[in-house]
Amino acid sequence: MESEKEVETVIVGNYVEMETEGKPNDIKSKLLSFLWHGGSVYDAWFSCASNQVAQVLLTLPYSFSQLGMISGTLFQIFYGFMGGWTAYLISVLYIEYRTRKEREKVNFRNHVIQWFEVLDGLLGKHWRNVGLAFNCTFLLFGSVIQLIACASNIYYINDNLDKRSWTYIFGACCATTVFIPSFHNYRIWSFLGLLMTTYTAWYLTVASLLHGQVEGVKHSGPTKLVLYFTGATNILYTFGGHAVTVEIMHAMWKPKKFKAIYLVATLYVLTLTVPSAAAVYWAFGDLLLNHSNAFSLLPRSPFRDMAVILMLIHQFITFGFACTPLYLVWEKALGIHECRSLCKRALARLPVVIPIWFLAIVFPFFGPINSTVGSLLVSFTVYIIPALAHMFTFKSPSARQNAVEQPPRLVGRWVGTYTINAFVVVWILVVGFGFGGWASMVNFVHQIDTFGFFTKCYQCPTPTSMVMHPPRLNTTAPSPLHH
């Protein structure tokens, strides 16, 4: 018991100091602290839940049309729990690394620990390099996807500009995230972000049920292996948002309390993703195969416009979530990470946004790009590498005996943990990376062949299609390309 208390003190020491020293004295400071400084368990939960379900909420009905209702639901539950498990592994490795370093009197007061540093401290530079490459590439394309989603969504409110023009505009808007120092400062944004996605999810559910099934609706999925595994990898991507787990933990005053936060966040997210995806698929069926954004099939109304606006704001927040770790890596590369001037750090961060902006214009394939990123990057970044890192970190009997965090009895202690880890590695390697990589790349190449690079307006209706499919005024389905 004494050793456990000692470990707890070591882990949270600096954050207790920071919280105590920064006690606000006046009302203005207290208000700023309430909105800006978040390090509680609730802040971490809001960050995890808000970050996990973003624009992908709009593409899950598209995945259901590829997978079918039963497979789509089962894959969400399966990958949700698998994501919760690997997030738990990452939290264990973070606590192990931080405890070892703070016993060596290392001070992290002005330094944000990141995943690649955990791998470096526990397993060496080769693991660090691999982890850094996968993590940065995934977060880079994660930011690209948020930018693409902004342009795709706003088009359903205002189509006076094409989607590429909207990408230019929102790229400039999202660049303002350089002024948010770390995840410690996302308190109000995380809370609002989760409210926004909750509204959007239930709007999709209720609007689809009230709309009813379109005339002659078909639910033929799954029909092709390519489509089946493409849909599965999009769901893999959905529950792979824990690439920022270490940064969220480091923002907490008591990181050891993080263990079950991600799992609880996943359970809440499932209450949003399963009903909304199932309802939209029930209403529109195979029409979703050519409409990767669920908004495109729902008739315009004040409620839909509100959902679009809220998702735009949330995508701005999620852009910051994905980009902040990249900003921190870039600061460390430039040697200004511990600089106290926020303006200098913000100015130094700006070059990180440029390649994201460029890639969003090159590959504006909202939907298919999610599956590609899921199979090629998410599979390694947040599933395979954490499972293998945990196995290698505690491979010796002494390492297991002296581990700060012992595996829970519920999973069978060390034997059960190693069994689950091995299953995660094999499953993701074969199904996620293997079959999923093949399917998503075939689909991605098909999008390039059909629309080309730098396409001006991805999946926008042509004047010809608008003449052939004019909007109908009855109470059945709108045209598939209806705005």
Image (spheres, helix red, strand yellow):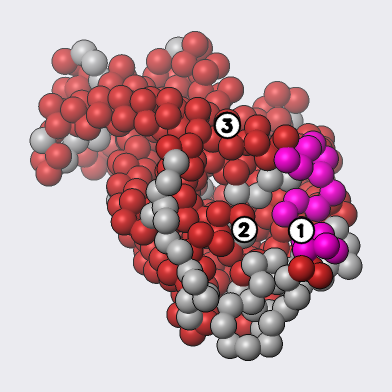
SS assignment at label 1: loop
Quadrant of the drawing holding the C terminus: bottom right
- Badge 1 or badge 3: first in the primary sequence: 3
* Residue drawn at 12 percent across, 44 percent down: 410
Residue 227 in percent (x, y) is at 48, 42
Amino acid bearing label 2 = His
- Are the residues flagged by discs 2 and 3 in contact, CB closer than 8 Å? no
Q: Is the magenta stretch mostly helix, strand or loop?
A: loop
**Residue type, label 3:** Val
Along the viewing direction, whichever of 170 and 292 lies nearer the viewer: 292
- Separation (CA) of disc 1 from disc 3: 22 Å
Indicate the quadrant containing the N terminus: top left, top right, bottom left or bottom right. top left
Q: What stretch is highlighted in magenta?
A: 450-465
- In this rendering, the count of numbered labels is 3
Q: Which residue is most to the bottom?
A: 474
Q: What element carries label 2?
A: loop
Residue under label 3, please give it: 442
Q: Residue at x 32, y 42 (%)?
A: 82
Measured Cα–Cα span from mark 2 to mark 3: 18 Å
Where residue 291 is drawn, which disc sits there?
2
Q: Which sits earlier in the primary sequence, circle 2 or circle 1?
A: 2
Residues at marks 2 and 1, CA–CA distance in whole angstroms: 10 Å
Residue 217 in the image, given as x and y percentages of width and height: 48, 69
Residue 148 shown in magenta? no
Magenta segment includes 453: yes
Give above or below for 199 relative to 19.
below
Q: Which residue is drawn at 60% across and 43% down?
A: 368
Residue 239 or residue 28, whichever sits in front: 239
Residue that appears at 52% across and 76% down? 215
Residue labelled with disc 1: 460
Q: Tell whether 155 sits left or right of 193.
A: right
Q: What residue type is labelled 1?
A: Cys
